[in-house]
Amino acid sequence: MNTSERRRALLQRAREMGYVDAGSLAHVFGVDSSTIRRDLAQLTRAGLIRRTHGGVLPADPGTVIDTPYAVRQNENLEAKQAIARAAVDLVQDGQIVILDNGSTTYQVASELRRRRNLTIITNDLLVGVRTAGHPTNRLHMTGGVLLDTVYTLVGPAAVAAFDGLHADWAFLGAESIDAEAGVTNINVVEIPIKHAMMAAAAKTVFVADSTKFGRRSFATVCQLSQADLILTDDGLAIERRPAFGTKLRCVH
């Protein structure tokens, strides 16, 4: 288990148990106590956990922000790159594309550089940087308030940026995808802009690696029926796939 995997597992443990004894974590994860202290310091700075006497609590689910890029940017990277390639195979030169925030949509932004004369709209600063400088593609950044650990612009200005726009595609990330609960997110502050992106696009595609499936997060984004396509990798077990319906596509 590498650093990013361990931090995600630690965070998930705190969310599932509600309270975790900090003293036991080194034993649980098979590392020394100094390593765990660095993990806890990083997650605390990101606003994902709260330290309490002798232990760790998950942050308030109403205010917590998404897992920071520093934790997730290299997680399941090959799967995210494969998903991104499949996503961009759907896009034709000259189309208008909306990109949500996230490490998978960042890979989509990278792959979109092989298309020409696109208009790309995003609320993710890193996606914007990856898009910028292309000889023919045009970039539109939303306004809004920055969630600095995930480089995401949110709030009324970000939502208003999509008023009156018409895009061919919206590629959205997903914190969790469940057959019954649908697509869910770790916070509520990003929900309005995700809805605005979906409303502005002719087709909505969710891009998420297979580790996101069968989980539920705090806030509902939409039901699976509201997506036009759900792209993931073939790490999702074959016997689990039918529960997610005919819109699911698993890529190698």
Image: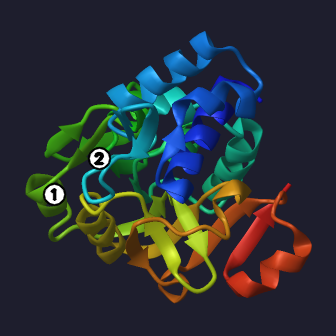
Up-down: is 199 above or below 9? below
Numbered circle sitting on residue 23: none
Total numbered badges shown on the rendered structure: 2
In depth, the one of 40 and 225 nearer the eye is: 40
Which amino acid lies under the numbered mark 1 shown in the image of this protein? Ala
Residue shown at the point (55%, 80%) measured from the top left: 228
Q: Amino acid at mark 2?
A: Asn
Look at 69% across and 82% down and name the residue there: 244
Pointer 2 residue: 123
Q: Residues within 10 Å of mark 2 (few under 14, many from 20)?
A: many
Please, what secondary structure does the residue beneath circle 2 have? loop
Depth check, front residue: 72 or 123: 72
Q: Residue furthest right?
A: 238
Q: Kindly indicate whether the residue at mark 2 contacts the one at mark 1 (C-beta within 8 angstroms).
A: yes
**Residue 109 visible to an observer of this rendering:** no
Check the image and report above or below for 31 versus 29.
above
Q: Position of residue 175 (x, y in %)?
A: 51, 58
